[in-house]
């Protein structure tokens, strides 16, 4: 049983290959060996009754930290650029993580409570989304540029 006082970390990754999945498990085992409570799909047997999407959501809520093992495949899937029928799990998981980061950034610095901190957060968010939009191009890039413009309002 994991020590509830120890830090907890959720590991997000894509199933690129059996070798990659094995390396992620080695990382998780090494962290566990150092006292970290690791939340990893490979430790869940059988599959959760609630289904993987709800398990991901609940597990992210329970974790203090999120480790994202970012490979090109992970990025492609999280950004919705994978071929149809592949990578649904990590795309869902990436969306959950992305939304948590976004919402956290907006709730830590509210316009009323900390106007300068809020402005800095919005500026940083706008810069990051603007750069991402330029890099992505196309409809997805335009969507990110629109989000960047909203951040500056």
Image (tube, grey):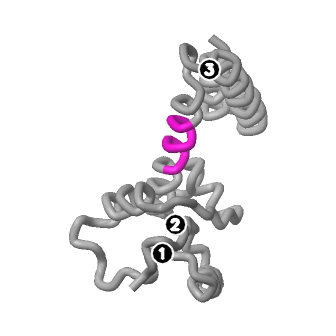
Residue 40 has which mark? 1
Q: Residue at x 27, y 66 (%)?
A: 51
From the image, tell me which residue sits under label 3. 114
Residue 31: image tag: none
Measure the alpha-carbon separation of dots 3 and 2.
30 Å
Indicate whether residue 54 is drawn in magenta: no
Label 1 crowd (10 A; few <14 / some 14-19 / many >=20):
some
In front: label 3 or label 2: 3
- Sequence-wise, the earlier of marks 2 and 1 is 2
For the residue carrying disc 2, how many other residues have a C-alpha within 10 Å: few (<14), some (14-19), or many (20+)?
many
Front in this rendered view, residue 124 or 63: 63
Magenta span main SS:
helix
Q: Are marks 2 and 1 in contact (CB under 8 Å)?
A: yes
The percent coordinates of residue 100 (x first, y second) are 50, 44
- Residue 57: x and y in percent read 38, 56
Q: Which callout, 3 or 2, points at the residue further toward the start of the chain?
A: 2
Q: Residue at x 45, y 79 (%)?
A: 3
Left or right: where 119 falls relative to 92: right
* Highlighted range, magenta: 97-104
- Label 3: how many Cα within 10 Å (few below 14, some 14–19, many 20+): few
Q: CA distance from mark 2 to mark 1?
A: 6 Å
Pick the front one: 45 or 105: 105
Q: Mark 2 highlights which residue?
A: 10
The reply to whether the magenta stretch includes residue 100 is yes
Asked if 4 appears above or below 107 in the picture, the reply is below
- Label 2's element? strand
Q: Is residue 27 above or below residue 70?
A: below
Measuring 55% from the left and 65% from the top, which residue is drawn there?
12
- Of marks 1 and 3, which one's residue comes earlier in the chain? 1
Dot 3: what SS?
Answer: loop
């Amino acid at each position: 049983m994991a020590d509830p006082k120890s830090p907890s970390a959720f590991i997000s990754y894509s199933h690129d290959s059996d070798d990659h999945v094995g390396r992620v498990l080695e990382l998780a085992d090494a962290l566990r060996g150092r006292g970290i409570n690791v939340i990893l799909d490979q430790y869940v047997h059988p599959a959760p009754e609630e289904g993987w999407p709800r398990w991901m959501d609940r597990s992210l809520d329970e974790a203090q930290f999120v480790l994202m093992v970012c490979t090109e495949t992970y990025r492609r899937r999280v950004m919705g650029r994978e071929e149809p029928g592949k990578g649904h799990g990590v795309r869902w998981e990436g969306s959950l993580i992305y939304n948590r980061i976004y919402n956290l950034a907006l709730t830590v610095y509210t316009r009323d409570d900390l106007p300068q901190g809020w402005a800095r957060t919005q500026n940083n968010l706008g810069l990051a989304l603007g750069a991402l939009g330029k890099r992505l191009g196309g409809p997805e890039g335009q969507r990110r540029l629109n989000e960047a413009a909203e951040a500056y309002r």
